């Protein structure tokens, strides 16, 4: 009986994905998945030809389960790993992940927090001969299908506000832009506005879990996101997301999605459409 139920569940799942993707057959598209890792950040981008970019690892090992649900069981390589900054809710899941996956390129801001887990991660990556790159604003990494990953902001030295160490990156693909902000605050947003960021953003990873210390009205008006994703834990102690940020996004008619309400969120996108596949809780 259990085997029959398992087989039936597998058939339903495969049928669902075939139905979901059928309108995309013959077309290029990319995937961006925002993992439900509780009060933390972790997201995966998969290019049209299958290159993988993992941004942050969340506060614990939930990211491993989420990756296991998304990536084929035989795939144990991540092409790019970005650690936006070394706060625990972005860093901790990467330690165990580095033992189970081969990381080809690791992009970080090289700020030394003197954390044992960060040292462990670096040692693990060194054993795998991972290419370790210190992020600098202006870096552009060319990917398949004409896609690219650009570093817009990266701390050059320690600052008062640790969230402003965050790497801010843009993934541009098939006429779409995904903006990945880490926990960057209003000061970094001002830098971005003065450095020429004026393109409309299709999918925004809302900074710092929807905190009012970021996501200024001026910045949101500039980038005009179509979709905003808030990676946040249910009933968290920080009262994230701040009601004022939700109000701002609603005022700008942005579609808002939250991992605490919807679980892991997967989007398919190309130059014609952005399609949400709600994997849910």
Image (cartoon, rainbow, N blue to C red):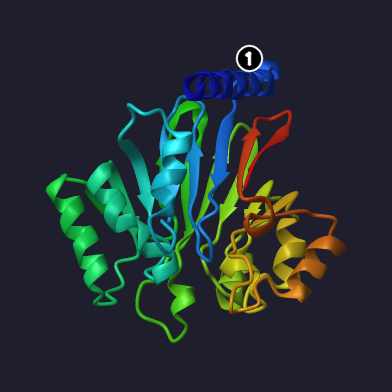
Counting the numbered discs, the total is: 1
212 relative to 181, above or below: below
Q: Nearer the viewer, residue 191 or 212?
A: 212
Furthest residue in direction top, as rendered: 26
The secondary element bearing badge 1 is classed as loop
Relative to 35, does residue 110 appear above or below in the rendering? below
Residue at 64 percent across and 54 percent down: it is 204
Report x, y in % for residue 77.
Answer: 31, 36
**Residue 105 horizontal/vertical position (percent):** 29, 45
Query: Most extreme residue toward the left, as rendered?
Result: 127
Q: Residue at x 51, y 34 (%)?
A: 147
Q: Find the residue positioned furthest to the front.
A: 1
Residue position for label 1: 25
Q: Is residue 192 left or right of residue 117?
A: right
**Is 125 placed left or right of 234 in the picture?**
left
Where does residue 31 sit, x and y in percent of width and height? 56, 35
| Snapshot quadrant of residue 259 | bottom right
**In the image, residue 95 above or below residue 187:** above
Of 165 and 88, which appears nearest the observer?
88
Q: Residue 127: in sight, yes or no?
A: yes
- Can you see residue 140? no
Q: Residue at x 62, y 50 (%)?
A: 263
Q: Position of residue 200 (x, y in %)?
A: 71, 50
């Amino acid at each position: 009986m259990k085997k029959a139920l398992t087989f039936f569940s597998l058939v339903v799942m495969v049928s669902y994905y075939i139905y979901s993707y059928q309108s995309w057959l013959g077309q290029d598209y990319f995937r961006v998945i925002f993992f439900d890792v509780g009060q933390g950040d972790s997201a995966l981008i998969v290019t049209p030809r299958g290159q993988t970019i993992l941004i942050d690892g969340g506060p614990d090992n939930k990211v491993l389960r989420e990756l296991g649900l998304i990536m084929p069981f035989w795939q144990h390589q991540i092409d790019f790993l970005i650690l936006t900054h070394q706060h625990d809710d972005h860093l901790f899941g990467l330690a165990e992940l580095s033992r189970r996956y081969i990381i080809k390129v690791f992009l970080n801001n090289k700020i030394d927090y003197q954390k044992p887990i960060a040292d462990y991660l670096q040692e693990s990556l060194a054993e795998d001969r991972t290419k370790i790159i210190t992020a600098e604003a202006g870096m552009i990494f060319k990917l398949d299908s004409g896609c690219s990953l650009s570093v817009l902001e990266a701390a050059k030295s320690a600052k008062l506000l640790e969230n402003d160490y965050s790497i801010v990156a843009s993934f541009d693909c098939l006429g779409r832009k995904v903006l990945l902000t880490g926990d960057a605050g209003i000061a970094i947003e001002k830098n971005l506005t003065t450095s020429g960021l004026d393109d409309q953003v299709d999918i925004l990873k809302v900074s710092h879990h929807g905190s009012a210390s970021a996501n200024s009205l001026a910045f949101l008006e500039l980038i005009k996101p179509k979709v905003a994703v808030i990676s946040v834990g249910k009933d968290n102690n920080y009262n994230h997301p701040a009601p004022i940020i939700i109000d701002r996004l609603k005022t700008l008619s942005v579609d808002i999605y939250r991992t605490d309400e919807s679980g892991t969120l997967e989007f398919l996108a190309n130059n014609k459409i952005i399609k949400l596949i709600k994997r849910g809780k």
